[in-house]
Amino acid sequence: MDSALILTTIAILVLMILSGFFSGSETALTAASRPRMHRLLNQGDKRAEAVHTLWERKERLIGAILLGNNLVNILASALATSLLISLVGEAGVAYATLLMTALVLIFSEVLPKTLALYHADRFALFVARPIQVVVLLLSPVVQVVQWFVALVLRSVGAGPSSESDAERWEEELRGAIDLHQGEDDEEVRHEREMMRSILDLADVEVADIMVHRRNVLTINVDEKPEDLMQLVMNSPYTRLPLWRQTPENIVGVLHVKALFRAVQAAEGDVSSLDVMAIAGKPWFIPDSTDLLSQLQAFRARKEHIAIVVDEYGEMLGIVTLEDILEEIVGDISDETDIGVEGVDLLQDGTAIVAGTVTIRDLNRRCDWRLPDEEASTIAGLVLHEARLIPDVGQTFSFHGFRFEILGRQRNQITLLKITPLSDEEKEAETATS
C-alpha cells in the first residue's frame, strides 16, 4: 500500500511538471519576438526554425498544448482525489479539490507562465522541439477538435477574420513603433516618424509631395544661349525642366553638368550651344503614382526627376528623388537650397504655418495627426473643411485644432495660426458637430 501511495504521489508530481511545461510553452511561443526569431532563423538556428514551423499552424499548436495541458491536469486531479479518499475517506474529495487548485494555480500556471514571460525567447527556443513532438502525437485528435470548433464558430458568424497576415503584421509593427521610447525625446520622435514614413510610402501619392508648377524653376529652350547660361548659373538646382511655347509644354530636362561639359567642349563659346542636343528627355508620370513605386522607378531608370501630369496630360509639377527621401528622413538642406516659409512653433504649442506647407510635413514637425486624405497642404485642408475661401481674421475649429487665417493673397491662403484645442474645447466641438 505504501508503495502504491508513493507511486501515485510521484505520478501527480510528474503530471504537474508536465502541466507547467505546457503552460509555460503556450505563453513563451505566443509571446516570443517574431523579428528576433526571424533573425536567428536567418543565422541557421535550428531551434528558431522549429519555432517558425510551429507558428505556421498556430491553431494546431494551441490546440495540442491545451489538449495536453487538460489531459495532465485532469489526470493529476483524479489521482489526487483517489489518493486522498484512500487516506481520509469521502472528505478527500474536498481536500483534493482545494489542494490541487492551489498547487496547479501556483506551480503549473502562474509560476511557469511568469517565467515564460520574463524569458519568452529563450523559453520558446528550449521547448520548440519537444512541443513539435507533442503536436505530432496529438495531431489526429486536435484536427477533430479544430473541425468541430470551426463548425460552431461559423454557425454563429464568428469565422476567421478577412484581414490578411500582411495587414496584421503591419499594424503590429506600427504599434511597436508607437511604443518606441528613449532618453532623447526629440531624437526618438524623429526615429518614429522615419519608420512610420517608410510604412506609408505605398499609401502616399506623388501629388501629395510634388513641387507645384508655380514653384518650379523652368527655362525657355528658345532663350539666347548667353541668357540661358546666365539663368542656369543663377539657379540653385542641378536639373532644370526646359519648355517651348508655353511653360507647361516641357520638352526636356537640362542637367547642369552636361551643360558645363558642352561649354568646355566648345572652349567657352556658348553662342553655338544646342541646348536640346544636350538635354535629356522628360519623364512624365501620373499624379496618382505612389511613392514606393516611384522610388523603385527612380532606382530602375537611374533618374532623379520626373514631371507630374494629371489625367489630361497637363503638367502639375515635378517630383525628385530627394523629395521622396525627405518623406522618410525629413528635410534635407544644403548650402544652395532656397529658404522657404514653413512652420514656426511657439512656446504655447501654437504654430504659425504657411499655407503651402504639406499636412504630412506639419504632422511630422509637430507630432500631430491632421488627416491628409482630402488635401495635401494645410491651406487645402482649411478650404475643404470650410467649404469657402476665408477672409483674413476668420477662425475655424475642426480635427481638434483652431485655424486662424493670418494671410491671404487673392484666392490663396498664405499664412495660418494653428492652435491645439483643450479637452473642453474638443468636447464642445464634438457636441456641435
Image (cartoon, helix red, strand yellow):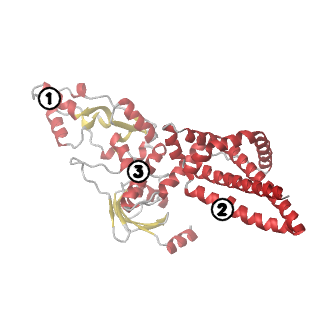
Q: Please, is residue 401 above or below residue 313 in the view?
A: below
Q: Earlier in the sequence, mark 3 or mark 2?
A: 2
Q: Residue at x 69, y 48 (%)?
A: 62
Q: Label 2 amino acid?
A: Val
Looking at the rendered image, the disc whose residue lies closer to the viewer, 1 or 3, is 3
Q: Earlier in the sequence, mark 1 or mark 2?
A: 2
SS class of the residue under badge 2? helix
Q: Which residue is mark 1?
A: 263
Q: Which residue is mark 3?
A: 194
Tell me how many marks there are: 3
Q: Is residue 237 left or right of residue 324?
A: left
Q: Residue 147's image quarter?
A: top right
Residue reaching furthest to the bottom: 424
Q: Residue at x 42, y 37 (%)?
A: 294
Q: Residues within 10 Å of mark 1 (few under 14, many from 20)?
A: some
Quadrant (top left/top right/bottom left/bottom right) for the C terminus: bottom right
Residue reaching furthest to the right: 90
Q: Which residue is mark 2?
A: 110
Q: Residue at x 77, y 54 (%)?
A: 11
Horizontal and vertical percent position of residue 255: 24, 33
Label 1, label 3: how many angstroms apart (C-alpha)? 42 Å
Circle on res. 274:
none
Q: Label 3 amino acid?
A: Met
Label 3, label 2: how many angstroms apart (C-alpha)? 40 Å
Q: Earlier in the sequence, mark 1 or mark 3?
A: 3
Horizontal and vertical percent position of residue 304: 32, 36
Q: Residue 145's image quarter?
A: top right
Q: Please, is residue 12 above or below residue 88 in the view?
A: above
Horizontal and vertical percent position of residue 177: 48, 54
